Amino acid sequence: MKNIFVLIAIVCTYGCASRNTHPIHEYNVTGNSQYPGVELTVNGGYVRSYTDCSQNGCYVHKDKTGYFFRQELLETKKFKGVYKRNIDANFQLYVNFSNIGEKDKPWDIAKAIVSGLSLFLIPVSLDAVFQGEFVLKNNSEVLVERTYTMNSRQYYSWFFTPDTEKRHVIESMVSHFMADLLKESKFVEEV
């Protein structure tokens, strides 16, 4: 009987591991040279949020896209700083990140029903296409402009949040942007 519960737990959480399956572009992070600090603006500074209320109270859901981008850029260790708002920063990085289309399939409703009947122990997976547009400027001059598009599969269950997959996509896009940025000669490193 105990083995049956273990088997059910493994089957219900299969596919929910939080490993990043998106390609990470390798780039050199060694050395003391760094880029100057940048002011980061994600999705025009707009943070999507909504309030969900029930009998137990209200909870405000906030989109963490800007936070994820800032964390990933800081982890590159190539910038002196990544700022939300800094009027003194000469360099600005504008990122527009969006889900440009979920690929709905006829059986998605069936998957949602089965997941609901299992009290969301069986994860629901939905395919999505994310697009990230990066524009690096020095005051008003555009230095680097790149667009990345990635297919993704988001899982919804008790054990897995969609933000995890979004963070993996952002991590991959930032790695590609940094690799492209290191190839550019317009953005000079400071010693």
Image (cartoon, rainbow, N blue to C red):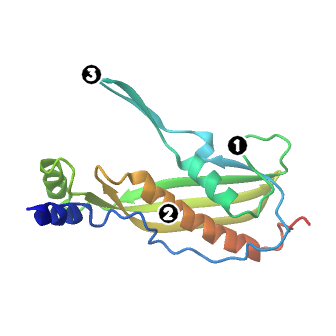
Separation of marks 1 and 2 at Cα, in angstroms: 21 Å
In the rendered structure, find residue 84 and report the number of the disc placed on it.
1
**Tags 1 and 2 in contact by the CB under 8 Å rule?**
no
- Give the secondary structure at mark 1: loop
Find the residue positioned furthest to the left: 1
- Lower position in the chain sequence, tag 1 or tag 3: 3
Please provide percent x and percent y for residue 38: 77, 52
Residue behind mark 2: 169
The residue at 83%/69% (across/down) is 186
Q: Would you call the spot at circle 2 few (<14 residues within 10 Å), some (14-19), or many (20 or more)?
A: many
Q: Nearer the viewer, residue 163 or 140?
A: 163
Q: How far across and how far down the image is residue 73, in percent?
A: 67, 58
Disc nearer the start of the sequence (3/2): 3
Q: Name above or below for residue 46 compared with residue 167.
A: above
Quick one: quadrant of the N terminus?
Answer: bottom left
Q: Pinpoint residue 188: horizontal percent, then vertical percent.
A: 86, 68
Circle nearer the viewer, 3 or 2:
3
User: Residue 184 or 125: which is nearer the viewer?
Assistant: 125
Mark 3, residue position: 55
Q: Is residue 134 above or below residue 61?
A: below
Name which residue type carries label 3.
Gln
